[in-house]
Amino acid sequence: MAKEDRATLLREYFDHYRLAVANDPSALNQKIPRAAFADMLDRIGDLVLIEARRTASTPGPVRDFLTANTLPGRWSELLPDEFRVFCLALNALKQWTVAESAATDRFILGGNARAELRATAATCLVTGEPLGPDAELHHPLRDGRPPVLLSKAGHARIEGQAAATEDDPRVAAIIAVRAEGNRSWAMLRRGCLDLLGRDVTQSTDKVRASSKTFARKAVERSGMTYDEILAWLEERGL
């Protein structure tokens, strides 16, 4: 697509969201519930387990990697090869997902998206303030459409829009706890799962502790249970 055509397309895109936000700010934050892809995710999970079991006992680069990176002491009893390969496969899948997501962002705008978006709009769609150098890319909907540029304040506001529009003091309490610690919804999910004794992977012990603290405060302030908070997160795809 020629640059002039992309510029015209982006102006139409911004005009569309400028009108949409005026009527309903949540138009900038549409997320499909995770349950909509539950069957597909279950099949992917089964495939990763099967491949981890097969690869752990089959000669090849993965088996060679495990041999070259032995576990110290009793760790070999705690982390069997099949589980190690499962973790390695999850990390490979994460890297693949990140790369594929980045490729979808380049599908329409190529590799110069930020500059072309900045040339289209000078002010934030949410706050109306000028877009500074710290403007953030935000996807209204992850279906292949390009992101829009929002100010940091606008981005923070719109990320909580789906929850903030609900007339529920329990939700408002959780949002307040999140804002106080500048934490993510993913940390709340992992913290709830951890405190319920369910399997959850945390990047570091510090992140684990912070996630659990977030979850405890959310329960204390909102009066909701861990399961209720998880159901709320699931319903909104957070």
Image (cartoon, grey):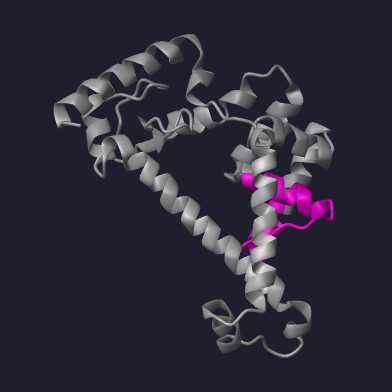
| Residue 170 percent across, percent down from the top left | 76, 27
Is residue 58 within the magenta segment?
Answer: no
- The residue shown at (40%, 30%) is 145
Looking at the image, residue 180 sits to the left or right of residue 233; the answer is: left
Looking at the image, residue 78 sits to the left or right of residue 68; the answer is: right
Numbered range of the magenta stretch: 186-211
Viewer-closest of 73 and 121:
73
Would residue 85 be visible to someone looking at this image?
Answer: yes
- The residue shown at (21%, 29%) is 119
Is residue 53 shown above or below 138? below
Name the quadrant containing residue 74: bottom right
- Look at the magenta stretch and give its main secondary structure: helix
Query: Which quadrant would the N terminus be assigned to in this image?
Result: top left
Is residue 210 within the magenta segment?
Answer: yes
| Residue 87 percent across, percent down from the top left | 63, 67
Viewer-closest of 77 and 38:
38
Is residue 69 shown above or below 184? below
- The residue shown at (68%, 54%) is 45
In the picture as drawn, the residue positioned furthest to the bottom comes out as 73
Is residue 59 shown above or below 1? below
- The residue shown at (24%, 42%) is 112
Would residue 210 be visible to someone looking at this image?
Answer: no
Name the quadrant containing residue 139: top left
Query: Which quadrant would the C terminus be assigned to in this image?
Result: top right
Tally the numbered discs.
0
Is residue 92 shown above or below 107? below
| Residue 138 percent across, percent down from the top left | 42, 34
